């Protein structure tokens, strides 16, 4: 196994419960297991210091968001974006206003944006939502609108 592969395997193994880790190491050739064990011990403290993956999602998405622009300003701002970016902006900054915007779009654009929205995750990271809501406010009202 390459050194990069060994590091990846060690990181994976370090994240497992000790019983599972011992079992998996026992399934490997002895030489590989011996090479992995010190790497696992080295990386284990680093993994423990990292925030849990859910920590990136736990913050309420609405906290810190900028108010969604009025419908006419929202339509103008989103019209300036291509379908993919308009969908991302809606999902992150104005999910409750998707219907308003899609109703104001020509049918082909609305279908394209709807398709993009369906491909996006149902929940975006709070920091991304805040950033995109600031960008949407700035697009709709100018830079001063995104100031808290």
Image (cartoon, rainbow, N blue to C red):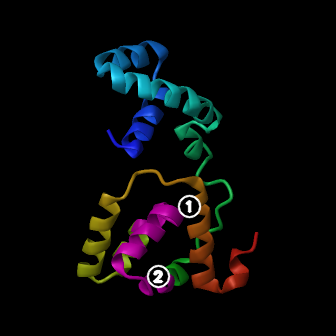
Q: Nearer the viewer, mark 2 or mark 1?
A: 1
Q: Position of residue 101 (x, y in %)?
A: 41, 75
Instruction: Tell me what residue is drawn at x 45 percent, y 32 percent.
Output: 10
Judge the density around disc 2: few (<14), some (14-19), many (≥20) Cα neighbours within 10 Å.
some
In front here: 38 or 51? 38
Span of residues in magenta: 75-98
Q: Which residue is mark 2?
A: 75
Q: Position of residue 18 (x, y in %)?
A: 48, 15
Q: Above or below — where is 145 with respect to 128?
A: below
Q: Above or below — where is 77 with respect to 4?
A: below
Q: Secondary structure at mark 2?
A: helix
Judge the density around disc 1: few (<14), some (14-19), many (≥20) Cα neighbours within 10 Å.
some
Answer with the quarter of the image where residue 12 lies.
top left
Answer with the quarter of the image where residue 9 lies.
top left
**Residue 119 belongs to magenta span:** no
**Residue 105 shows up from this direction:** yes
């Amino acid at each position: 196994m390459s050194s990069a592969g060994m590091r990846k395997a060690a990181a994976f193994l370090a994240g497992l419960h000790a019983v599972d880790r011992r079992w998996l190491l026992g399934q490997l050739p002895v030489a590989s297991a011996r090479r992995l064990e010190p790497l696992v011990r080295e990386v284990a403290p680093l993994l423990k210091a990292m925030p849990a993956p859910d920590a990136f999602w736990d913050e309420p998405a609405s906290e810190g968001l900028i108010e969604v622009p009025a419908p006419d300003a929202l339509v103008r701002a989103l019209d300036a974006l291509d379908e993919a970016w308009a969908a991302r902006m809606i999902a992150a900054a104005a999910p409750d206003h998707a219907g308003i915007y899609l109703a104001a779009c020509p049918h082909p654009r609305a279908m394209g944006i709807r398709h993009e929205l369906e491909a996006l995750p149902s929940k975006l990271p709070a920091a991304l939502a805040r950033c995109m809501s600031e960008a949407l406010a700035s697009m709709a009202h100018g830079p001063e609108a995104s100031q808290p």
